[in-house]
Image (cartoon, rainbow, N blue to C red):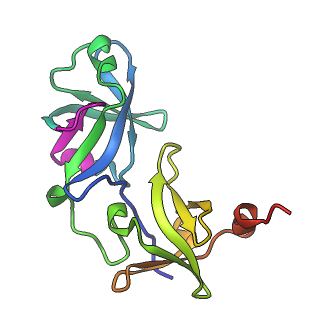
Amino acid sequence: MLGEKRFICAMSALWHHMGTLLRPHGIKGEFCIEWYADSPLLLDMPLWLQRPQESSPQPIHLRSVRHHNGRVLITLKGVEDRTAAESLRGSKLLSRRDDLPELADDEVYVQDILGQDVFLADGSRLGRLDHLECATGQEIWAIVTNAGQEVLFPAKPEFILRFDKEHSSIYISPPPGLLEIYLASDG
């Protein structure tokens, strides 16, 4: 088993979806954000904002970053009040792939493993990694099985055995009972 594995939610070959602007916090233009990257230090890199329903990201400049009750709060240059903050709710915080740090051997960017085959510890193919969900703060992988069923897999390091980059494969050891819940026959 590899050491601790880390993931960054992603969206395309050029852009990585690092987080999402949530509700305003207070009246001075501060935001709560859902931060998908494993390190808030990545907020120091160049970031871009993509508003809902818009395709072109725009560069942004952070004025401040702080933590409050387990959440990351930010302020942006040019966003001075709650109304302006509310107008950006749901916008994506992006980074360019070229700006991201180099990865260690036991790290991957999620976009690089989407579509890969997923195998169990015994070598049997479970299916394909279709997409992921990060909304709860816990990364969940949606694996489409060989039979076309969806399995929601908690992407925790203790359940991921290894990434085989050479063969574009992922090996997992699901928690006891998980597959039985999803793959039980109806009959």
User: Which picture quadrant has residue 52?
Assistant: top left
Of residue 58 and residue 100, the one placed in the foreground of this image is 58
Drawn side of residue 10 relative to residue 157, left or right: left
Q: Which of 101 and 155 is in front in this view?
A: 155
Q: In this view, does 108 lie above or below 1?
A: above
Which residue is rendered at x = 37% and y = 62% of the image? 110
* Image coordinates for residue 71, horizontal then vertical, percent: 44, 36
Image quarter of the C terminus: bottom right
Q: Is residue 68 above or below residue 147?
A: above
Span highlighted in magenta in the image: 42-57
Q: Quadrant of residue 145?
A: bottom right
Residue 174 spot, x, y in % from top left: 63, 70
- Residue at 36% from the left image edge and 57% from the top image edge: 8
Q: Magenta span has 54?
A: yes
Tell me the residue at 34%/12% (across/down). Answer: 27
For this view, does 131 lie left or right of residue 96?
right
- From this view, report whether residue 134 is shown above or below residue 67: below
Q: Could you tell me residue 142's position as x and y percent? A: 53, 58
Q: Position of residue 85 (x, y in %)?
A: 30, 19
